[in-house]
Amino acid sequence: MTHGTRQTFPKDWRADTLIADDKDMLETWQDKKWIKGALLGIGSFGKVYLGMDRATGLLMAVKEVELFHCSIPSQKRKKAVLGALKREIELLKDLKHKNIVQYFYSSLDDNYFNILSEYFPAGSVSTFLRNYGAFEEPLARNFVRQILEGLNYLHVREVIHRHIKGTSILVDNKGGVKISCLRGLKKSNGMHRPSPRLDSVFWMAPEVVKQNGHSPKADIWSVGCLVVEMLTGEHPWSALTPMQALFKIGSSSESKPAIPSDISSRGRAFLQLTFVLDYEQRTSAAELLEHRWIRKKP
C-alpha cells in the first residue's frame, strides 16, 4: 500500500493555509493516520480507495474529493469547496445508526480531501444484482425494511439522502444493509432545489427532475425505484438514456416506473404508495415501516 503520487500546489502554498479559517474542522482531520490501498471504484463525486488505519489495522473505504483543478486555487473556490465539505462532515459525524454507514474521520492530502468510513468487501446491492441476479421478494423486503429504518433515522433529523439507489446501499456478509452517506446529504430546511444529476436520474422523483424542490419524500420515491431494481435486476427506465429518462420522468402522468408483474399484492400496494406523484401526499419512511408488506415475516 502506498500514498501514491500527487500533483501538488506551488511551493509557497501549504495545506495549513487552506484550513486556517476552519479550525473547528481540525479535530476530524487525521493526516497521515491511514495508508492508501487499492482503487475500489469511481463515481461522479470522485474515487473510492481502500484504506488502512495505521494504528489499528482497520480497513476503511476512502472517498477522495479533488479540491481544485488549477495550479493556484482561488480564494472564492477554496471557500466554496471547504464550506460544502464542512457541512457534509458536520452531518456525517453525528450519524449513528445500525443501517447507516459509519463515518470515521477525514484527512487533507495535498489537493485532495479524504473521507474515511466503514468498508464493505461484499459491495453494494448493485454488486449483488450483477453477481446473483434479481432478488426474490423476501430478500428485497428484508433489505428494504433495513433501508427504511436508516432513512427514517435521517428524515427525523431533517436530513435528505438524495441518492438512494443500488450503488448507495452496502451489504455485509450477514445480509445486513447500510445506507452509504458519502455524497450529497442535505438538511431539509424547506424545499431544496438542486439541479438533477444524470447518474441518479433513473431513481429521481418527478419534483426533483422538474426542480420543484427536494424534500425527504423524494427519498421515498427512490426507495420504490430501488425495489423495482432489486426485483427485476434493472433500474427503472432501463431502455432509456439518462436524458430520455429525465424527459420521461418529468412528463407528468407517464412518470411512474412500471411495477413488476409478478410482485405480490402487498408488494404492489407498497410500491403504489412510493410512486404517488404529489410529494405532499406521498407516504413517509415511518409509515412504510408499518406497511403489511414490510411487516410480513419471511
Image: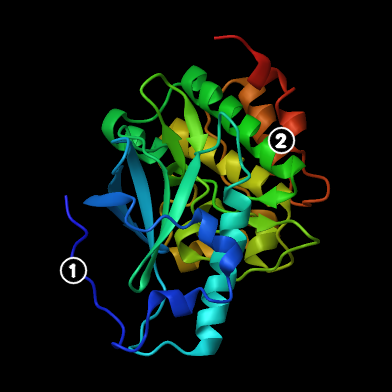
Vertical arrangement, residue 216 with respect to residue 101, above or below? below
Residue 55 is situated, as x and y percent measured from the top left of the image, at 31, 40
Q: Residue at x 45, y 60 (%)?
A: 199
Q: Which residue is mark 1?
A: 5
Q: How many marks?
A: 2
Label 2 element class:
helix
Q: Residue at x 36, y 38 (%)?
A: 119
Query: Which of the image's four quarters has the C terminus?
Result: top right
The foreground one among 185 and 228 is 185
Residue 7 is situated, as x and y percent measured from the top left of the image, at 24, 77
Vertical arrangement, residue 121 with respect to residue 241, above or below? above
Check disc 1 and give the amino acid type.
Thr
Task: Determine whether, in the image, residue 146 is placed left or right of residue 232.
Answer: right
Mark 1 and mark 2 in contact? Answer it, CB < 8 Å: no
Q: Is residue 156 visible?
A: yes
Q: Residue at x 41, y 59 (%)?
A: 107
The Cα–Cα distance between marks 1 and 2, rounded to whole angstroms, is 44 Å
Tell me where residue 248 sits by quadrant. bottom right
Task: Determine whether, in the image, residue 109 is placed left or right of residue 89.
Answer: left
Residue 136 is situated, as x and y percent measured from the top left of the image, at 44, 21
- For mark 1, does the 10 Å Cα neighbourhood hold few (<14), some (14 to 19), or many (20 or more) residues? few
Vertical arrangement, residue 135 with respect to residue 162, above or below? above
- For mark 2, does the 10 Å Cα neighbourhood hold few (<14), some (14 to 19), or many (20 or more) residues? many
Check disc 2 and give the amino acid type.
Ala
The foreground one among 109 and 122 is 109
